[in-house]
Image (tube, rainbow, N blue to C red):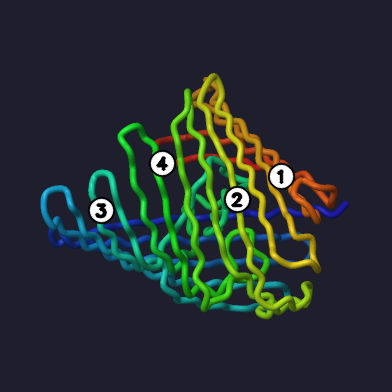
Amino acid sequence: MMKRVIVILMFVFTWSGAMSQEFSFDGQASGWGALQPFNTLQYQVGARYLPEVNISDTIFKDHQLTARLSANGSITHTYLNPEYDTKYSLKPYRGWIRYSTPHFEVRAGLQKIAFGPATMLRPLMWFDRLDPRDPLQITDGVYSVLTRYYFLNNANIWLWGLYGNESTKGWEYIASKKTRPEFGGRIQLPVPAGEIAFSYHNRVMDYASDTTGLFPNLGDVNEQKFALDGRWDTFVGLWFEAVAAHQQQDVLPSWSSQLNIGIDYTFGLGNGLHVTHEALFAGASEEFAGEGNYTAFSALSVAYPISLTDNATMMVY
């Protein structure tokens, strides 16, 4: 039996400096390494730097104007005996401006949009690619305008519009048409012991942009996504995310669906042993909730806080 051991190390260093209440500079440097010493020697080392500039000013009373600018620079060196490869990357990470009051905000630019109660297998991963194994939760943003309004009873409404994003996002396998705007929204309402929400998104898929050869060139195809999700905190934490997507074409299955059901609980062992389990059911069919190809996937996470800043986490898929 072949033995394989992979050792992964990571370090993070952050700092910040401020000239005044209106201007601040923050930076985060991180590094990682992975080693596979048996059979064919393999290893990878890398480093990342995220500088960030924040500017804020109070217009009047509780009306705030904020701007953020950040970049993502990284270097990765991989060795697969006897070959090696070194890659460099430098790209915008965040770049937005926000106007906000105690109950309202509108934010425009390159930003992160993420929502939904699931943590590992997320049907509502529409605009981000957050990896649950990444302690830094780094993900690319989208060029968009996001508006949110918060009511006194904790209900809130989201409205968004996206434009100029040429790469795939979240679970997408076909990129959006770069020159066609995307739009959608979300209504989140409080319910006893929890909250429930409905989300919607509309985009035009650009099948001509596919370079894998796995899909036929269907041209521009309109896609609509509908989602219902909820979370309740009782004796245990319970949540679900359900998504249905419809494509206006008749070559491939026009309906796809995903359902996530999750539960978590913290056992009173030492500093608290947090256990999370999620199950994902996904498939595609010609009709909504019709017969088709479906699959099931599950994930288990066990996390233990060693100190205020250190955690040990194990994940099984």
Query: Taking 187 as reference, is 177 above or below it?
Result: below
Kind of residue at badge 4: Thr
Q: Quadrant of the C terminus?
A: top right
Q: Residue 115 in the image: state x and y as whole percent.
A: 49, 48
> What distance separates the C-alpha of mark 1 from that of mark 2?
27 Å
Label number found at residue 317: 1
Q: Which residue is mark 3?
A: 100
| Quarter location, residue 143 | bottom left
Residue positioned 61% across, 66% down in the render? 44
Disc 3 to disc 1, C-alpha distance: 40 Å
| Label 3 secondary element | strand
Residue at 63 percent across and 63 percent down: it is 223
Q: Earlier in the sequence, mark 3 or mark 4?
A: 3
Q: Are marks 3 and 2 in contact (CB under 8 Å)?
A: no
Q: Amino acid at mark 1?
A: Tyr
Local secondary structure at mark 1: loop
Which of pointers 3 and 1 lies earlier in the amino acid sequence? 3
Name the residue that disc number 4 marks: 309
Q: Which mark is residue 207?
A: none
Mark seen at residue 226: 2
Residue 42 in the image, given as x and y percentages of width and height: 69, 66
**Amino acid type shown at disc 2:** Phe
As rendered, which of 303 and 145 lies closer to the eye?
Answer: 145
Q: What residue sits 47% from the left and 28% below the top?
A: 191
Kindly check if marks 3 and 4 are in contact, taking CB atoms under 8 A apart as contact.
no
Query: Label 3 to label 4, Cα distance in Å?
Result: 31 Å
Q: Is residue 68 above or below residue 233?
A: below
Of the numbered discs 3 and 2, the one sitting upstream in the chain is: 3
Q: Earlier in the sequence, mark 2 or mark 4?
A: 2
The residues bearing labels 3 and 2 have C-alpha atoms spaced at a distance of 28 Å
